[in-house]
Image (cartoon, grey):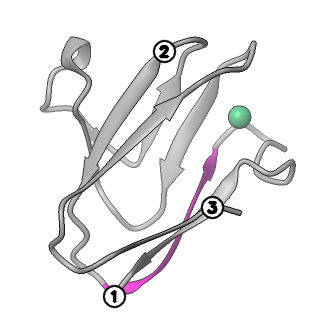
Amino acid sequence: MPVYKAKVRETVEFHVTNLGEQIHSFHLHGNKMISSTSERGSTITSQTFPLVQGTLESFIVKPDKPAIWLFHCHVVGHADAGMIGLFIVE
Ligand SMILES: [Cu+2]
């Protein structure tokens, strides 16, 4: 699975593209994500963002707690199929 590392208070930007034929969602535990995709503005915060087919989404995260956090697709069964990873904050 993919593993990304960051330090507390470091600014991290995730760029995620849905290359499939169905909707997915990007969910990160324990951290607030701020959408940086221009169409959606920069004020939308969430722990889950929908990923529409063929679109690129970007999220900014500024972790404030050291831990090993999971991120995964929120559609039932997709994490079990491999859409899961770790975000390690030191
Ligand atoms: Cu999915």
Rendering coords of residue 28 (x, y %): 47, 56
Q: Residue at x 40, y 68 (%)?
A: 30
**Tag shown at residue 90:** 1
Label 3, on which residue? Answer: 2
Element carrying mark 3 = loop
Q: Do tag 3 and tag 1 residues touch (Cβ < 8 Å)? A: no
Q: Amino acid at mark 3?
A: Pro
The correct choice, above or below, for 12 with respect to 3 in the image is above
Q: Which residues are magenta?
A: 66-73
In the rendered image, the quadrant that contains the C terminus is bottom left
**Tag shown at residue 55:** 2
User: What secondary structure predominates along the stretch shown in magenta?
Assistant: strand
Element carrying mark 1 = loop
C-alpha gap between disc 3 and disc 1: 17 Å
Rendering coords of residue 40 (x, y %): 24, 18
Does mark 3 have its CB less than 8 Å from ligand 1?
no
